[in-house]
């Protein structure tokens, strides 16, 4: 097991805006130790090695050849994610945390999941609110009949990042039932009738929505609008679970009062107190070492990975397989929109279908926005010792 100190050795792949703080969050956990970094940008690599006091490598292949890594963290532009996850799995790691969106192409998502699954490697994915303990509690309450039989999920979300936020949530509240078919609408899709060249992706989508029919009978209506609202209502025969900003905590559960027959809306339901935390935006204050706060979700993901490695239990947080399904639903809705709202059955047979995230996620942000913008962003990740 792990290092002489009984810690899991963590290898960070990509020490950029998001990678450095994710690496720090793992390093802070008493059972983890960041032991190596791989980054193709010498400037970020040097900064990361200095901050963490660990060896650095210009490729992940070299890192895996020289270091024994237990947990790999590919925190990369989306384009190299699939190859990095597959390489980590083949190098013999025991767990991988990959940032979201997972990838653009279904067959890439398939091979990421298959390489990990066939070797029993945990694949967690994305700092997403769906991994927060309050949401885990909410899925369990919905599954246990707390709001009666779940019938309908109303989602307010543009689903631009391959469905990794809203569609992933909807599927979890639907008990991860297989999707039978979808119909979809798309707004602001410049490539609505052809695919971009894979390596030169420029743009994402304005919005993707539609109707999702799960095999267990749950129906989801996913709508987007000019207003960038993100919310969810999980409607059951006896009550509702909702959050009117599902990028944050602040879930609510309302149920019919005993003997109540006629319920016409939320006001006729009683709120269950004390189940979930209040609405809160992540605390981004700096810690004693000068690192910007990790937010409400990341520490729970680190703890969940350590716990699953220790016990062999399934990951309670969002996985690569979850984001693969969310991507498939989003792509299917786009295919439906292309065919004039024709119902599209899942699983999709054509695994070559893609949905790119926005350009600055697909590519390296320093190349997209320029070095000046990028280094200002990097300066906000960790404050110099003189400012602490
Ligand atoms: N969940 C969230 O809230 C959240 C927030 C921010 C970013 N993200 C995601 O995290 C990921 C990374 O975002 P970022 O802003 O740190 O990206 P970034 O553009 O800063 O790039 C990350 C780093 O990856 C390195 N890199 C690129 N290709 C590489 C390769 N083949 N091998 C090794 N290193 C390589 C770059 O040099 C850079 O240091 C993205 O997928 C983004 O969508 C998620």
Image (cartoon, helix red, strand yellow):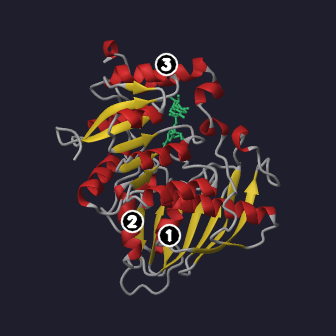
Mark 1 → mark 3, Cα distance in angstroms: 46 Å
**In the visual, does 371 lie left or right of 199?**
left
Q: Is mark 2 within 8 Å of ligand 1?
A: no
Q: Between residues 136 and 11, which one lies in front from this camera angle?
A: 11
Mark 1 → mark 2, Cα distance in angstroms: 10 Å
* Residue that carries the numbered disc 3 in the rendered image: 43
**In the visual, does 123 lie left or right of 170?**
left
Assess disc 2: are there few (<14), some (14-19) or many (≥20) residues with their C-alpha within 10 Å of its C-alpha.
many
Q: Between residues 355 and 66, which one lies in front from this camera angle?
A: 66
> Dot 1 lies on which element?
strand
Q: Can you give x and y, in whole percent of width and height, for residue 4 in the image?
A: 17, 38
Which residue in the rendered view is the most extreme toward the front?
Answer: 65
Sequence order check: which comes first, mark 1 or mark 3?
3
Q: Can you give x and y, in whole percent of width and height, for residue 155 in the image?
A: 58, 62
> Dot 3 lies on which element?
helix
* Mark closer to the observer (1, 3): 3
**In the visual, does 366 lie left or right of 239?**
right
Sequence order check: which comes first, mark 1 or mark 2?
2
Sequence order check: which comes first, mark 3 or mark 2?
3
* Residue drawn at (18%, 42%) of the image: 6
- Whether residues under marks 1 and 2 lie with C-beta atoms below 8 angstroms apart, the answer is yes
Mark 3 → mark 2, Cα distance in angstroms: 43 Å
* Residue drawn at (73%, 73%) of the image: 343
Location of residue 9 by image quarter: top left
Is residue 291 visible to us here? yes
Location of residue 372 by image quarter: top right
Assess disc 3: are there few (<14), some (14-19) or many (≥20) residues with their C-alpha within 10 Å of its C-alpha.
few
Q: Can you give x and y, in whole percent of width and height, for residue 213 in the image?
A: 62, 75
- Circle on res. 234: 1
Q: Can you give x and y, in whole percent of width and height, for residue 150 in the image?
A: 48, 77
> Dot 2 lies on which element?
helix
- Circle on res. 138: 2
């Amino acid at each position: 097991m792990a290092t002489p100190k009984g810690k899991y050795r963590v290898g960070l792949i990509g020490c950029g805006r998001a990678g450095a703080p994710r690496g720090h969050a793992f390093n802070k956990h008493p059972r983890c130790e960041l032991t190596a970094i791989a980054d193709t940008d010498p400037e970020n690599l040097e900064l990361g090695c200095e901050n963490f006091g660990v060896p650095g490598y210009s490729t992940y292949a070299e890192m895996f050849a020289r270091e024994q890594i237990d947990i790999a963290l590919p925190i990369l532009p989306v384009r190299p994610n699939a190859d990095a996850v597959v390489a980590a799995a083949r190098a013999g790691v025991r767990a991988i945390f990959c940032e979201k969106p997972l990838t653009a192409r279904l067959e890439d998502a398939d091979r990421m999941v298959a390489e990990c699954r066939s070797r029993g490697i945990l694949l967690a994915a994305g700092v997403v609110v769906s991994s927060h303990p309050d949401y885990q509690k909410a899925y369990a309450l919905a599954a246990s009949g707390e709001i009666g039989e779940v019938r309908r999920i109303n989602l307010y979300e543009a689903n631009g990042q391959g469905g990794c936020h809203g569609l992933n949530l909807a599927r979890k509240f639907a008990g991860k039932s297989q999707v039978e078919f979808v119909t979809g609408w798309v707004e602001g899709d410049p490539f609505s009738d052809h695919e971009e060249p894979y390596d030169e992706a420029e743009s994402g989508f304005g919005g993707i929505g539609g109707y999702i029919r799960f095999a267990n009978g749950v129906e989801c209506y996913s709508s987007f609008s000019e207003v960038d609202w993100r919310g969810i209502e999980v409607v059951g025969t006896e009550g509702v679970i909702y959050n009117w900003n599902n990028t944050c905590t602040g879930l609510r559960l309302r149920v019919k009062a005993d003997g109540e027959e006629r319920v016409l809306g939320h006001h006729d339901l009683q709120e269950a107190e004390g189940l979930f935390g209040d609405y809160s935006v992540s605390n981004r204050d700096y810690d004693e070492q000068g690192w910007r706060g990790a937010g409400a979700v990341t520490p729970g993901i680190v703890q969940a990975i350590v716990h699953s490695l220790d016990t062999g239990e399934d990951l309670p947080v969002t996985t690569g397989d979850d984001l693969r399904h969310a991507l498939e639903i989003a792509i299917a809705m786009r295919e439906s929109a292309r065919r004039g709202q024709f119902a599209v059955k899942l699983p999709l047979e054509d695994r070559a279908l893609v949905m790119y995230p926005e350009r600055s996620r697909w590519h390296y942000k320093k190349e997209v926005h320029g070095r000046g913008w990028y280094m200002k962003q990097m300066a906000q990740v960790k404050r110099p010792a003189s400012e602490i």
